[in-house]
Amino acid sequence: MAYWRFFAIKSTGSGLTAPQTVIEPVEVPKTLPNATIDERVQVVEKALTEVIKKVNTISSQTDSSLNTRVSALEASVTDLKVQIANLPAASSAPASSAKSSLYIPLGSGGSVASVDWTPLNTFQIVLDPSQYPGYTSMQLEVNMRLVQPGGTLYARLYNNSSSSSTSPEVSSTSTNSSVYTSSTFSLPSGSKTYVLQAKTSDGTQAFLDTARIRVNF
């Protein structure tokens, strides 16, 4: 609230002593009825002028502080750039191009009880080596077991399209299921049908649980 400021005169003293005059400031609200509209407008304008000055002062101080911080940050960034430029060049090691091996499932759930090579139709697939560019070799992996000891179980990957054996044989003499891995081989070019074949040395029953082809890069 704006106020008018004027001075009031107070008299002090007693008896024959001459009165002394004391001048004290007294705040009188500008909204009193005797204040004219022009006077009120002048007070408001003056108050606004003072407020604007203070705001500008605060803004100037804030901008100055921000400018100082920005300048400090720019100096830090420049210093970091210099340090990075002066770092010794790191020796670049050649990136390894080797890819992880992948597996092609052939099937599951087969059995054999013959001394002759027997195709197991539950393990059959159509393959084209062009689908695996850059491969270096393949291997047959078979999880299999004999029902009774004494014999030998054999398995291989057979090319039905050209009627020829594709992979080296894997063999087992155990009645416990285990995974057996063949030596490496390559597939002939083109799309062909492959099937797993198996036999036992004495014609007794044997089980082939799962089979897959490992593709090496």
Image (cartoon, grey):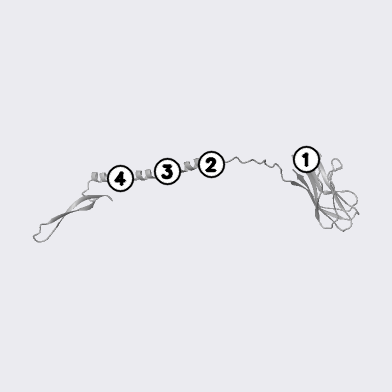
Q: Amino acid at mark 3?
A: Thr
Place of residue 195 in the rendered image (x, y in percent of width and height, measured from the top left)? 83, 46
Q: Quadrant of residue 16?
A: bottom left
> Mark 3 vs mark 2: which is more N-terminal?
3
Q: Nearer the viewer, mark 4 or mark 3?
A: 3
Specify the label residue 83 is tagged with: 2
Residue named by callout 1: 129
N-term mark: 4 or 2: 4
Task: Tell me the element at label 2.
Answer: helix
Disc 4 marks a residue whose amino acid type is: Glu
Viewer-proximal residue among 173 and 192: 173
- Which badge, 2 or 1, is on the more N-terminal residue? 2
Mark-to-mark CA distance, 3 and 2: 23 Å
Q: CA distance from mark 2 to mark 1?
A: 52 Å
Q: Nearer the viewer, mark 2 or mark 1?
A: 2
In terms of depth relative to the viewer, which is nearer, 134 or 115? 134
Disc with the residue nearer the chain's start (4 vs 3): 4
According to the picture, the residue beneath numbered tag 3 turns out to be: 68
| Crowd rating for badge 1 (residues with CA inside 10 Å; few <14, some 14–19, many 20+) | some
Farthest-out residue, bottom: 15
Q: Are marks 3 and 2 in contact (CB under 8 Å)?
A: no
Q: Is residue 149 above or below residue 97?
A: below
Marks 1 and 4, the one that precedes in the sequence = 4
Q: Are marks 1 and 4 in contact (CB under 8 Å)?
A: no
Which quarter shows the C terminus? top right
Q: Is residue 74 left or right of residue 164?
A: left
Residue 50: numbered disc: 4
- List x then y, in percent, for residue 11: 14, 56
